Image (spheres, rainbow, N blue to C red):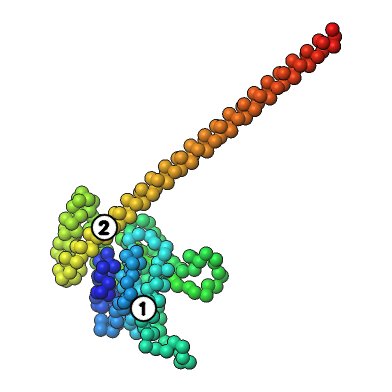
Amino acid sequence: MAGNREYKSDVFGMLMEEPGYALEVYNALNHSEYRDPGLVEVCSLERGISLSVRNDAAFILDMNLSVYEHESTVCPNMPLRALIYVTNILEQWVKKQNIYGRKLVKIPTPRFAVFYNGVEDQPELYQLKLSDAYANPMEEPELELACTVYNINAGMNRKLLSECPVLEQYMMFVGYVREYLGAYPEKDLRKAIDKAIDRCIREDVLREFLIRRRREVTKVTQLDYTFDRRIELEREDAIAEERVNTERERKAKEEALQEKEKERQRAEQAELEVQKLRTELEEYRRRFSEA
């Protein structure tokens, strides 16, 4: 995964690069007791993946292919993204095997997990399915991929976090960054991150990792929050534009209704004028006949 650093923008991906941490998360999710990080075979993607489609962690352990993703924003497209990752990985896996032969080619069993820690309220645990994106839904999809989403914010999935110190401490780091971001102007993002890292080191939260990779953590956290802020601003702009468009549509409908009402009134007035002329004509005819 080190070769894909340019596609990463969060500390979670850095943590999952390290076999010991990846093994800890695997054991917590699968209720296993593996102890040797050397059993973890980290999968690197040889082909480039765009910035909008990046992979946080993929590794093989005991013929199970785990694909882990971290999201700070709600993304319903995780199954589609996971499909891209796993297809690329399996393509590399079978490179030297004959997939056209009579012998069944065994592949690692894929498992997909998403760890959500954004500020929007989300359920504690839920699934996203690839078939949800199908333009033509099927009762029994011939191709399905399910991602289990774990909300790791405070108060959520407590058992999982208690059994997985790296996830728990990662969320403590995230919490401290958010806390200090609220205490400093946006231009002091670097100061907030530095204070969060210093506090974590004092409190033995990811201490060794943060000391060893402090510069990288600072950089990717700045990128992460800058990216999230840009997305937030774009979302705000989109909402504001939608409000303007909605107001324009409302005014246009209102003007159309007003114009329609005016036309109705003009038609009524014209009908009254016609009726008046008919009455006057009838009166004229009556007088003429009497004369």
Q: Amino acid at mark 2?
A: Tyr
Q: Amino acid at mark 1?
A: Ile
Q: Residue at x 42, y 42 (%)?
A: 244
Where residue 60 sits: x, y (%)? 33, 81
* Res 285 → quadrant: top right
- Along the horizontal axis of the image, is 258 left or right of 72? right
Where residue 142 sits: x, y (%)? 52, 75
Circle 1 Cα neighbour tier, 10 Å, few/some/many (<14 / 14–19 / ≥20): some
- Along the horizontal axis of the image, is 153 left or right of 291? left
Q: CA distance from mark 2 to mark 1?
A: 29 Å
Q: Residue at x 37, y 56 (%)?
A: 121
Q: Disc number at residue 89?
A: 1
Q: Quadrant of the C terminus?
A: top right
Task: Identify which residue, 89 or 168, lies in the foreground.
Answer: 89
Looking at the image, is 117 positioned above or below residue 143? above
Q: Quadrant of the N terminus?
A: bottom left
Q: Are marks 2 and 1 in contact (CB under 8 Å)?
A: no
Residue at mark 2: 225
Eye-nearest disc, 2 or 1: 1
Where residue 210 sits: x, y (%)? 18, 68
Q: Residue at x 34, y 84 (%)?
A: 62
Helix, strand or loop for disc 1: helix
Residue most extreme to the bottom: 102
**Residue 218 visible in the picture:** yes
Task: Identify which residue, 32 or 283, lies in the foreground.
Answer: 283
* Res 116 → quadrant: bottom left
- Along the horizontal axis of the image, is 2 left or right of 134? left
**Residue 115 visible in the picture:** no
